[in-house]
Image (tube, helix red, strand yellow):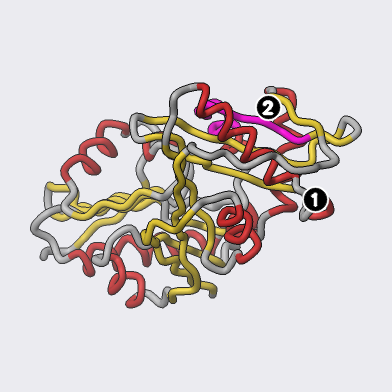
């Protein structure tokens, strides 16, 4: 392959991003609510060009707590994926380091990514595991000190604080991403104690069923039945809407979360997405 030129993608190049992702032989998109085009304007968002053709695309902007997830990756047909990735990642890493970012991560959405990430110093540290259950035989809600209601727009600031305390830095989402998740949710509810939001859930619905996309409980109020009550309430509403299947995912090292879901009748599907991390 002739020499590669790597440059930043401008916010106006939506057509370039859409074209690259639709024609790429190897594609990766992060497991979240943000469309690749919506990330334009955040950096690093890079494109690699060889002669007169675009051969690679990479977006890994900084997230909460200084963690840069690989959110978009596209590599064209007929190229050496390792060579194009290397050129893109070296430039992205330089920009991240210049910005003071020392932590990067990537979900492994396909085995083709493994040698690319390993060759750049990433190491497997965790995995995202998937669970599912039907909406038959809904368990009783149990006892809980909270009251439950619909998640309203005015709750976003309080929910963001709950999210920040409930998750480790790698898994936190920004207030902006949380707002996008709320807007796309088909069902969203919060747990309230004395006027204070202490837990929440966000769920999407598609033709395949419902997906519990986010569940968080303030650490001080965990193990009080609040998370269970939020999920049971969700399951009952899904039954009313005619939804028969619910999925969710959590981390392989989050034993408390997995215990909760198993107790509520969820079972692992066998699908796992390895998590790779790099810290400088």
- Disc 1, SS: loop
As displayed, is residue 174 above or below residue 60? above
**Measured Cα–Cα span from mark 2 to mark 1:** 20 Å
Identified at 60% across, 62% down, the residue is 100
Is residue 200 found left or right of 80 in the rendered image?
right
Classify 10 Å Cα crowding around label 2: few (below 14), some (14-19), many (20 and above). Answer: some
Answer with mark 2 or mark 1, whichever residue precedes in sequence.
2
20 in the magenta segment: no
In the image, residue 74 above or below residue 142: below
Query: Which residue does the image show at 28% across and 61% down from the upper left?
Result: 110
Residue 137, position in %: x, y?
53, 39
Please name the residue shown 32% across and 32% down the image: 14
Q: Position of residue 152 (x, y in %)?
A: 69, 23
Q: Nearer the viewer, mark 2 or mark 1?
A: 1
Label annotation for residue 4: none
Magenta-tinted stretch: 179-191
Question: Is the C-beta separation of discs 2 and 1 under 8 Å?
Answer: no
Which residue appears at 43% of the width and 61% of the height?
106
**Mark 2 — residue?**
151
Per the image, label 2 sits on a secondary structure element best described as: loop
- Mark 1, residue position: 224
Relative to 183, does residue 104 appear above or below in the rendering? below
Mark 1: give few (<14), some (14-19) or many (20+) Cα within 10 Å.
Answer: some
């Amino acid at each position: 392959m002739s020499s590669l030129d790597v440059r930043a993608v401008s916010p106006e190049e939506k057509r370039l991003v859409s074209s690259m992702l639709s024609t790429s032989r190897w594609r990766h998109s992060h497991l979240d609510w943000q469309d690749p085009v919506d990330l334009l304007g955040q950096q690093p968002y890079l494109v690699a060009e060889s002669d007169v053709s675009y051969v690679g695309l990479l977006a890994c902007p900084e997230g909460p707590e200084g963690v840069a997830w690989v959110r978009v990756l596209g590599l064209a047909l007929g190229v050496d994926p390792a060579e194009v990735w290397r050129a893109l990642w070296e430039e992205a890493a330089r920009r991240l380091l210049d910005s003071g970012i020392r932590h990067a991560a990537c979900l492994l959405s396909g085995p083709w990514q493994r040698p690319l990430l390993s060759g750049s110093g990433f190491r497997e540290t965790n995995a995202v595991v998937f669970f599912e259950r039907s909406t038959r035989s809904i368990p009783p809600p149990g006892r809980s000190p909270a009251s439950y209601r619909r998640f309203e727009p005015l709750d976003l600031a309080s929910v963001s604080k709950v999210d920040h305390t409930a998750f480790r830095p790698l898994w936190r989402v920004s207030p902006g991403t949380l707002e996008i998740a709320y807007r796309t949710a088909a069902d969203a509810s919060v747990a309230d104690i004395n006027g204070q939001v202490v837990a929440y859930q966000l769920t999407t619905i598609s033709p395949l069923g419902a997906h519990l996309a986010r569940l968080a409980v303030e650490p001080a109020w965990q193990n009080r039945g609040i998370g269970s009550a939020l999920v049971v309430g969700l399951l009952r509403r899904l039954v009313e809407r005619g939804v028969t299947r619910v999925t969710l995912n959590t981390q392989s090292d989050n034993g408390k979360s997995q215990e909760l879901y198993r107790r509520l009748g969820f079972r692992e599907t066998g699908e796992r997405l390895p998590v790779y991390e790099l810290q400088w």
